[in-house]
Image: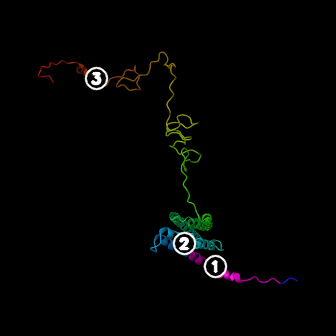
Amino acid sequence: MTSPAEPAPTDATQARQLTRPLRELVALVLLGANAVLLFVGFVRLVVPTSDYGTFSGRAGSTFFSFVGIEATVLPLLAVLLATHVSPVLPRARQITQAAVGEYAFGALFGALAFLIWLVGRLAEAEVLDALLGMLTRAAWFAVFAVAAFVVYRIWRTLYFVPKPKPQPGVYGQPQPGWHQQGGHPPAGYPAPGQPAGWPSPGHPAPGHPAPGQPAGQYGQPTAAPAPPFGAPQSAPPYGTAPHSAPPFGQPTSADPTQTIPRQPGEAGSPGDADSDRTQRFRRDDPNAH
């Protein structure tokens, strides 16, 4: 006999519904607590709190404030709550970026505190203490690095948006928008690889016809070609007088051999015969006009 199916438990569902609105608050509290601890460690490293302490001693004690259990676990838990529990929080990106920043701050000052403490121990000839302390701090650094790498990988994969880099122009290649339809550059610009002033393909130089176009149809008519050097020149037929300009005062349409009657009042008419005579005057005559 088969037993009837038991109803699914609803306790887990109810608990999830109760804690889901609190995930963002918990993540922010974890990040805030870690930020306060990092600030306290920084103050203890810089400001002496006792007259008997040394700078290397403060560096050895504050190392665990930068690379300790709190600095390692708290940012990682905040990121896992924001990104690995469905649904993802609306501020998951900001939480992840803040966690990456806290890990970077802790790694920087943790390494600085470790070097200061190690130099102080070696200066005081505490070789065994320096060796044991170095191994302990190296182990904590390894755990810290793993947690930091996980958070950095999440931020790099999900929330990092690289800025587009402008493509630099390459010498000899046309820039975007250079070519027009048909693959030719605009009129008045040389083709890529040609010197300035050189006619581009499809656009001849001013005063020259395009390829395949008869002469005299592009812009203005072209002059007739000159005869070859040494070719005989054509002369008018024998007995034909070359045309010359008509005499001054004679119409161009008149025949050069035609006699034109003179009009009254013109020079040479019978009524003006006396006017054509040349008269001689003496320069010393006072009555001469």
> How far from the left and from the top, in percent, is residue 1?
88, 83
Which mark is on residue 20?
Answer: 1
Amino acid type for the residue under numbered disc 1? Arg
Question: Residue 138 location, x and y as percent?
Answer: 60, 65
Quarter where residue 159 is shown? bottom right
Find residue 272 and report its image quarter.
top left
The residue singled out by tag 2 in the image is 65
What residue is pinned by disc 3?
267
Q: Residue furthest right?
A: 1
Q: Is residue 138 above or below residue 171?
A: below
Left or right, 255 with respect to 204, comes to left
Q: Are marks 3 and 2 in contact (CB under 8 Å)?
A: no
Relative image position of residue 190 (x, y in whole percent): 52, 42
Q: Residue at x 69, y 81 (%)?
A: 13
Q: Which residues are magenta?
A: 4-31
Q: As rendered, which of 98 and 281 lies closer to the eye? A: 98
Distance in Å between CA atoms under marks 1 and 3: 131 Å
Kind of residue at badge 3: Ala
Q: Give the mark toward the camera: 1 or 3.
A: 1
Number of numbered tags placed on the structure image: 3
- Asked if residue 59 lies left or right of residue 270, the reply is right
Q: Are marks 1 and 2 in contact (CB under 8 Å)?
A: no
Q: Secondary structure at mark 3?
A: loop
Q: Earlier in the sequence, mark 1 or mark 2?
A: 1
At mark 1, the secondary structure is helix
Which label was assigned to residue 247? none
As measured in the structure, the alpha-carbon distance from the residue carrying label 1 to the one carrying label 2 is 31 Å
